[in-house]
């Protein structure tokens, strides 16, 4: 099917894009990579009279390191660019590995990080890992810019904290200490994950684990019991010992997740996957 | 998807009936239900259901048919509609049962709402859990609004957080039921009778009469089909079918015979008019 006719706007800067959105309101939408939007327009499940193509806006692409060491990823940066970016590969190899395996090559080349976050399809990889990394997003709107922690950004299926006339401009990740390692493990029968686990293990004092499960419920879920248990572990334990001490806490966290049966698997199966993938992600973080 | 609301409410069956049999009033309790119009008196209504899941919007013109009702006891209805843009269809069947109970001076009414909903089409491809979750939200919101509506009933009767109003939603197979409601009750004059109502949060199950199919309902003594005359209210004239067709054909035959026998050609006009007039019947509103 073809998409219904719409007016295509190509603003050159952020202010112009936001002004267009304010002008046309619900009849307009932002368009970045198009891997979600164009499919939905062609399937006629979404309809807009105005599509605001933001790909021409300078400054929304690429990865850079701010003066304080914060890694800033422009919202228009594609998954493929992230996977191959030297800064990401050096500082966040776990996230680079995730980006290498997002969906398929066509999606990785065209799809943008900002797009996948704003569309908020629950079965996505990046949101889980960004929550584990304690990232935050920068939103620009008619009233200026604001920052929202990634953990508060995802409100549910196709719902985020972004206001309709706001544009996600960048994703910020705090500098990682030398003792911090991260990993993401996912499994699914389709191109989308049935369950994804993001883990960040820091051996700095205090020892800290950030463990999040994604795709299994409406938005990424923190595995709080496992995180709390990890904080009490001795620092010199090996990977297997750490896992043996955390497995019951992870299983208890998994039981609490509001999982549903769907094409990606049954709820019990997905809860089982949480434990399996958490073990793999955790061990991948261990030196 | 099947949904259920079981409640023991501090109201008379008459009071609840006023809400549930007034389709325009009950429509205001359903989130996103707008533009309710009566197409055929006490039988067919039209409405528009508007829903939004993230960027996805539904705008479903819906036809609501009241299949049968038994005054102050039961009403059964079906609603169906299709969103033209996305091809998404929604079918809802709902049976509301009321059973008045007396406990001393206390009058309570058992409310049992059973509904089944099917969503199909492109938007349903978003995934069953998402559609089910939104449906559960709708029924929970319906319950909230119903509670607020009941709180306004009859002035002196107030609702206190002790009665039982529980909503359950589950799969078609009836598994994985999820309780989303809490409990409310009240007694006349604001005095709650703990013995008459279950504890807060306790779903009430299987006490009210089970919903009947429309066929069963029609066979049950006292059940009034939606098109049947009812006592009271305004009276309207309606054409009775198939009497209208038979009368007009007979009238045309009479006119033909009259003209053939040399009578006035005005018979061609007068006879059918008489046939039409003889086909009129009264219906009480």
Image: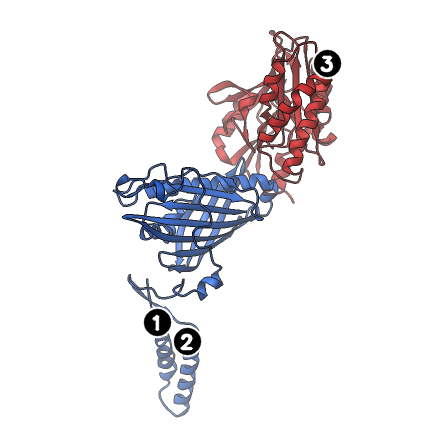
Chain at tag 2: B
Where disc 1 sits, the SS reads: strand
Label 2: which secondary element: helix
Task: Tell me, yes or no, whether the two marked residues, 2 and 1, touch with CB atoms within 8 Å.
Answer: yes
Residue, disc 1: B281
Could you say which is closer to the camera, residue B171 or residue A140?
B171
| Residue drawn at x 47%, y 41% as measured from the top left | B138
Q: Secondary structure at mark 3?
A: loop
Q: Quadrant of residue A208?
A: top right
Q: Which chain is blue?
A: B
Which of the marked residues, 2 or 1, is nearer the chain's N terminus? Answer: 2
Q: Residue furthest bottom?
A: B261
Q: Estimate the spatial distance between the alpha carbons at disc 2 and disc 3, rounded to whole Å.
A: 90 Å
Task: Decide which of B132, A18 is in the foreground and name it.
Answer: B132
Where residue A231 sits: x, y (%)? Answer: 61, 14
According to the rendering, which colour does chain A have?
red
- Observer-side mark, 1 or 3, equals 3
Query: Is residue A74 something one can see in this rendering?
Result: no
Quarter-wise, where is residue A39 in the image? top right
User: Looking at the rendering, which quadrant does residue A172 occupy?
Assistant: top right
C-alpha span from label 1 to label 3? 89 Å
């Amino acid at each position: 099917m073809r998409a219904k006719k719409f007016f295509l706007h190509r603003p050159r800067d952020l202010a112009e894009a936001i002004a267009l959105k304010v002008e046309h309101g619900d009849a307009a939408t932002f368009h970045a990579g198009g891997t979600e939007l164009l499919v939905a327009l062609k399937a006629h499940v979404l309809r807009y009279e105005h599509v605001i193509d933001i790909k021409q806006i300078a400054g929304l692409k690429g990865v850079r390191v701010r003066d304080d060491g914060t890694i800033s990823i422009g919202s228009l940066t594609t998954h493929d660019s992230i996977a191959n970016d030297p800064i990401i590969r050096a500082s966040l190899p776990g996230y680079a590995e995730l980006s290498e395996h997002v969906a398929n090559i066509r999606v990785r080349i065209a799809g943008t990080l900002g797009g996948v976050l704003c569309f908020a399809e629950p079965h996505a990889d990046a949101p889980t890992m960004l929550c584990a990394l304690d990232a935050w997003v920068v939103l620009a709107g008619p009233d200026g810019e604001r920052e929202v922690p990634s953990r508060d950004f995802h409100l549910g299926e196709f719902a985020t904290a972004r206001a309709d006339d706001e544009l996600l401009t960048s994703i910020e990740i705090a500098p990682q200490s030398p003792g911090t390692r991260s990993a993401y493990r996912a499994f699914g029968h389709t191109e989308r994950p049935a369950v994804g686990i993001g883990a960040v293990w820091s051996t700095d004092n205090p020892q800290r684990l950030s463990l999040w499960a994604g795709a299994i419920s409406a938005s990424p879920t923190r595995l709080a019991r496992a995180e709390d248990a990890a904080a009490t572990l001795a620092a010199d334990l090996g990977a297997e010992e750490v896992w043996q001490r955390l497995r019951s806490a992870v299983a208890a966290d998994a039981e609490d997740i509001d999982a549903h049966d769907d094409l990606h698997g049954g709820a019990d199966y997905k809860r089982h996957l949480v434990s399996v993938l958490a073990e793999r992600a955790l061990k991948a973080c261990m030196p | 998807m099947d949904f259920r609301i079981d409640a023991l409410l501090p109201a008379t069956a008459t009071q609840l009936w006023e809400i549930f049999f007034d389709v325009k009033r009950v429509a205001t309790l359903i989130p996103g239900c707008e533009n309710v119009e009566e197409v055929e008196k006490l039988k067919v209504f039209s409405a528009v259901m508007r829903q939004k899941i993230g960027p996805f919007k539904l705008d479903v013109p819906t036809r609501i048919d009241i299949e049968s009702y038994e005054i102050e006891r039961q009403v059964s209805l079906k609603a169906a509609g299709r969103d033209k843009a996305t091809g998404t269809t929604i079918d809802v069947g709902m049976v509301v049962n009321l059973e008045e109970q007396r406990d001393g001076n206390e009058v309570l009414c058992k409310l049992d709402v059973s509904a089944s909903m099917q969503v199909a089409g492109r938007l349903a491809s978003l995934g069953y859990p998402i559609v089910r979750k939104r449906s559960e939200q709708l029924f929970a919101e319906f319950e909230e609004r119903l509670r607020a509506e009941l709180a306004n009933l009859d002035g002196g009767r107030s609702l206190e957080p002790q009665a039982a109003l529980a909503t359950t939603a589950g799969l078609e197979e009836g598994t994985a039921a999820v309780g989303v409601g809490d409990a409310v009750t009240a007694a006349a004059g604001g005095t709650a009778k703990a013995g008459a109502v279950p504890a807060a949060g306790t779903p009430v199950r299987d006490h009210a009469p089970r919903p009947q199919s429309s066929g069963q309902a029609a066979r049950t003594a006292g059940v009034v089909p939606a098109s049947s005359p009812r006592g009271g209210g305004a009276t309207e004239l309606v054409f009775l079918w198939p009497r209208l067709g038979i009368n007009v054909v007979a009238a045309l035959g009479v006119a033909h015979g009259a003209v053939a026998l040399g009578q006035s050609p005005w018979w061609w006009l007068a006879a059918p008019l008489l046939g039409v007039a003889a086909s009129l019947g009264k219906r009480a509103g």
